[in-house]
Amino acid sequence: PYGVGKLNSVVDTATLASRNNFKTGICTTGNSLEKTPEDEKHMLKNDASVKDMEAAAIAWSCELHGIPFVGLKVVTDIVDGDVPAQDEFMENLSTASKSLQAAVPKLLESMCSDRHVEL
């Protein structure tokens, strides 16, 4: 069925989030940049914080092949905002990219320090 399923992160996301001042939340998926009525239904049902079009496919592929997965997302557009999604996406893309550029090394450092692995 469309959009039905649940995949969990393989790491302690609460601890990683706390160490790095990240927010946590449930991510749902959809096949549109816009929020469709179907997307909204799934977001409400799952108490989702964000919706994207890629994370679920990557997480599902990882699960199929026994590869650990953790998702790190930045928000480029607000699904319930008044600005058209494509305009808000372009307006926020640079800021979101810079945020992600800063967050990835912090996340990797935290994950590696838990496993005593050097970057």
Image: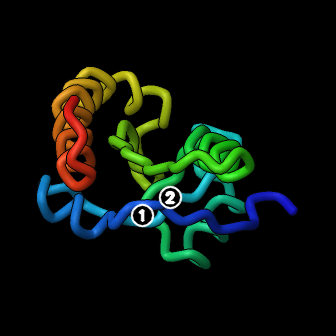
Along the viewing direction, whichever of 46 and 32 lies nearer the viewer: 46
Along the viewing direction, whichever of 100 and 34 lies nearer the viewer: 100
Q: Residue 34: horizontal and vertical position, in percent?
A: 59, 43
Q: Is residue 46 above or below residue 1?
A: below
* Label disc, if present, on residue 49 of the rendered structure: 1
44 horizontally vs 42: left or right = left
* Circle 2 residue: 27
- Residue neighbourhood size for the residue with mark 1, other residues' Cα within 10 Å, grouped as few (<14), some (14–19), many (≥20): few
- Which amino acid type is shown beneath numbered disc 1? Ser
Q: Is residue 26 above or below residue 100?
A: below
Q: Residue 41: horizontal and vertical position, in percent?
A: 66, 70
The color scheme shown is: rainbow
Look at the numbered discs 2 and 1 and tell me whether their residues touch, using CB distance below 8 Å.
yes
Q: Residue at x 64, y 68 (%)?
A: 6
Q: Residue 92: horizontal and vertical position, in percent?
A: 29, 29
Q: Residue at x 61, y 41 (%)?
A: 58
Along the viewing direction, whichever of 91 and 55 lies nearer the viewer: 55
Along the viewing direction, whichever of 81 and 73 lies nearer the viewer: 73
**Quadrant occupied by the N terminus:** bottom right
Q: Residue at x 59, y 45 (%)?
A: 67
